Amino acid sequence: MTSVVKYRELVHRPFNKVLIANRGEIAVRVIRACRDLGLSPIAVYSEADADCRHVSMADQAWCIGPGPSSESYLRIDNIIQAAKSSGAEAVHPGFGFLSENADFANAVLEAGLVWIGPSPMAIHSMGDKTFAKRAVTAAGVPCSPGKNEPLKDVEDLKKVISQIGYPVILKAAAGGGGRGMRVIRKAEEIEDSFANCQREALSYFGNADVFCERFIERPRHVEIQILADSKGNVVHLFERDCTIQRRNQKLIEEAPSSYISDATRAEMGLVAVKAAQSVGYVNAGTCEFILESPEKFYFMEMNTRIQVEHPVSESITGIDLVQWQLRVAMGETIPFEQKDIHIRGWAFEARINAEDPFNGFRPSVGEVRRLELPAGPGVRVDTHLYQGYRIPTHYDSMIAKIIVHGQNREDALAKLYRALGETIIDGVETTIPYHQALIRGSAFKSGEYTTRFVEENEALLKEFESRQPELSAEAALASLLSINSVRRENSSYAENGNANNGQSTPGSRQETMNQVQSTSPWSQAHRLDATRN
Amino acid sequence: MKFKVHQKGDAQSWYFEISDQILEQDLQPGRVLLATKLNEEMKPLGDVQIRLHRDRRSICIDNMVIPFFGAGTLLKGTDARIKMGAPATFRRIAIEQIKPIAIKRSSSNLGGGDQKSPLTGKVLSILVTDGQKVNEGDVLMTIEAMKMENRIQAECPGVIQNIKVQSGASVSVGDLLCTLIPAADENGK
């Protein structure tokens, strides 16, 4: 970094009006925490989100620009303006968008508002991977062997490789989200990979600095939830196992992890607390680790915000993390110590995305025509969906999180399977079938898998489909009538003129039925395919 | 109308006769309807009672509760995917009308023809040019939606014509992207 920015210190004081600089599911989650504390939530929204659930749940709602996030949810000036106009006293960033942007945190403080999160300096420090690794190494946190400084040139890289051996991974210092990374397995690849990685780092993150560390082929991904107050108290809420990922995007998370022992758990918790203390961390945060074996773990990065999968930690500890984010920002002291926090039972979270798992996880946008959410013992659903909601194309495809809490891992898995089976989301394709196939697989049941599991088990869904119990006569008749009613629903939907009013066509695959003009829908074969309408 | 119903992978098929009236009216929740179960020779085996539950989550057939969830998805040909069972999972089911009308083989069931956008998003890149020959599975263009890159692939071998979009353009579901003239048509088949 050439220019040295003077970052402001955090301020802590009670507030009433909270602006939530986010949308969708997490905005709904924060609004609920505000209501629980008797605070007044203020929503912001883009033009594409005027009908989003978080808008109607808030006390005030301010439009901050057009649909694309670069013109709305990523516009610091617009959000600060909305905060001032609305009389907000504090800002909660949620996750994604500007949540890990030190300049945004700084702008909030500069506007005289309370920032609900760690200090801009802590965000900045943890955002630079090489700086973060140096800081935590100094505090005694184990990191994967490598060089914790930007590499000067190819010779520098060769020297590091001669020390740590193949394979190594090159990463962008300012990177994240699985982008700007390259694995080197032999000497011939060094020069090309180095140049390419630098180029990618520059284009993705505006900073060509890359560093390198030893690459772990088949790791587990386990992270520790941290909560720190402004008085210097830091506790951890144990771990979450997020090993099941697809293209570096987590699909399913659980707490605790079935992979590690109590001793490793305690050691990792201690290390995460140290990492947080090394940057003077305040509020909720997460230390991500990769595990080479059940005992050998390395610090990867720290996420300086609330995470998507926070509900599993809430379930097993009984601590409302988002509520504590607000209370810590108000200057409250955490009233419990590490010894008061215990793991109760087992929790899972399945991320429901509007993607078609039968079709390469292609995004599926459209209108939610029918919605029925699961309930019952141990089931929690965090979502912004409602019947009639149109999913906009501009944002992330995550539309709901199904969280279950059971007495043990087996019970929690059974409850997750039950909850997924009760869910109805019609009008868009979702990842629910994939989750069902995943948790019924033997590898998932036994807990033996790595971060490569999804890519190494491509046929998972197909195999699951072919393992279904035999069809009974009654079920055969029911499916015949069900498909007939799909055909009818679709034709009446098109007749009402709902199918084409400027927005995208809901359930495009089903809509194709309308184009098959015939007196009887059964008198010819229907050629239906997602690529042709 | 008579139907054959079959689940992929099963040895057994089921046969039913349902009146056109029921098929055309849709199921009225709460109303009892009758269908006839047939054997393989299309001989009636007896009537079955059908009642759709008012919450539309299950259907009672001769005292058996069959949960089925949501609309289901129609696939190629006679295939459908239906969420059913308890807990509900997705099943692949083929439903055929008995004595179907023979289907003419044409470009419309070979694949090819107008290639329309399956999603709403932004065209990232166009990898083909007018007149270019492509094979099945070749990537024609990529469209970005929800922060993800989606590949539009050729569904049959053929020739690309009439490219209607440019890279950077926004497209909606159903917008014409290009036309794919199937190779089989060219050969005059």
Image (cartoon, helix red, strand yellow):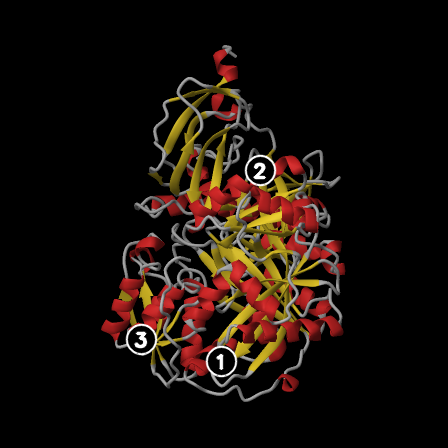
Whether B15 is drawn above or below A171: the answer is: above
Q: Quadrant of residue A329?
A: bottom left
Disc 2: host chain: A
- A162 vs A26, left or right, is right
Image quarter where the N terminus of chain B lies is top right
Mark positioned earlier in the residue sequence (3 or 2): 3
Report the mark closest to the observer, 3 or 2. 2
What residue do we see at 37% from left, 86% from top? Answer: A14
Whether A39 is drawn above or below A448: the answer is: below
Mark 2 is on which residue type? Answer: Glu
Q: Which residue, given by chain and number where applicable, does mark 2 sit on?
A: A191
CA gap, disc 3 to disc 2? Answer: 56 Å
Q: Position of residue A232 (x, y in %)?
A: 52, 83
Q: Quadrant of residue A138?
A: bottom right
- Packing grade of label 3 (10 A; few <14, some 14-19, many >=20) is some
Q: Quadrant of residue A262?
A: bottom right
Residues at marks 3 and 1, common chain? yes
Mark positioned earlier in the residue sequence (2 or 1): 2
Mark positioned earlier in the residue sequence (3 or 1): 3
Q: Is residue A476 visible?
A: no
CA gap, disc 3 to disc 1? Answer: 21 Å
Disc 3: host chain: A
Residues at marks 3 and 2, common chain? yes
Q: Which residue, given by chain and number where applicable, does mark 3 sit on?
A: A59
Q: Position of residue A511 (x, y in %)?
A: 43, 41
Disc 1: host chain: A
Outermost residue to the top? B188
SS at circle 2: helix
Q: Which residue, given by chain and number where applicable, does mark 1 sit on?
A: A324
Mark 1 is on which residue type? Answer: Trp
Mark 3 is on which residue type? Answer: Asp
